[in-house]
Amino acid sequence: MARDLEERNLKVVEALFAATSTGDWATAESMLTEDFFVTEADTLPFAGVYRGRRALHDLFMQVVSEAGVTHMDVHQLTAGGDRVVALLDLVLGGPPEVRVALAETFRLRDGKVCEIKPYYYDPRPIAAAVAARRQAGKR
């Protein structure tokens, strides 16, 4: 029974990645709970707690714009209980191209994502990219 829940949760997170990668925000928002939130660490230029279904779109657009993210490479998803962990790289445009490794935890409730918390292996590259783009007036 627990494995069935984990498989369902994996499918939800896979579908959420698919929707966000194609800009299908209506579908993405339908996979989030009403009280959904994302917590970005204080070590990041976009630190804070972002709340509500629209928060994922707004944060995504902010990170892409401010850091120059060209794409994400999702390497692996794994599930345990009500959590799914994604191992991925954010790829920042160059030259040179920079890969920022992170793990994101997704907490699910009743088949929808209620929380996302990213953990950056090293937040310095993304902080440097944001600072450089702000200094150059690119946003």
Image (cartoon, helix red, strand yellow):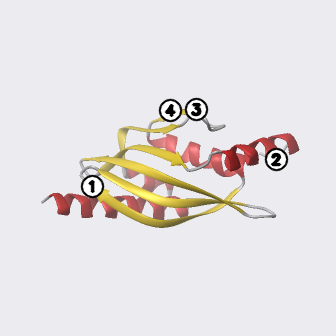
Q: Position of residue 18 (x, y in %)?
A: 47, 65
Q: Amino acid at mark 3?
A: Asp
Residues at marks 3 and 1, CA–CA distance in whole angstroms: 27 Å
How far across and how far down the image is residue 100, in percent?
A: 62, 56
Q: Nearer the viewer, residue 52 or 71?
A: 71
* Three-letter code, disc 1: Gly
Question: Circle 3: is it few (<14), some (14-19), or many (20+) Cα within 10 Å?
Answer: few
Location of mark 2 (residue): 138
Residue that mark 1 sits on: 80
Q: Does the CB distance between marks 2 and 3 fall below 8 Å? A: no
Q: CA distance from mark 3 to mark 4?
A: 10 Å
| Image position of 95 (left or right of 58) | right
Residue 11 in the image: above or below residue 62? below
Residue that mark 4 sits on: 49
Q: Disc 2 to disc 4, how far (Cα)?
A: 24 Å
Type of the residue with mark 2: Lys
Q: CA distance from mark 1 to mark 4?
A: 24 Å
Q: CA distance from mark 2 to mark 1?
A: 40 Å
Badge 2 or badge 3: first in the primary sequence: 3
Q: Which residue is mark 3?
A: 42
**Residue contact between numbered discs 2 and 4, judged by CB atoms under 8 Å:** no
Which picture quadrant has residue 136? top right
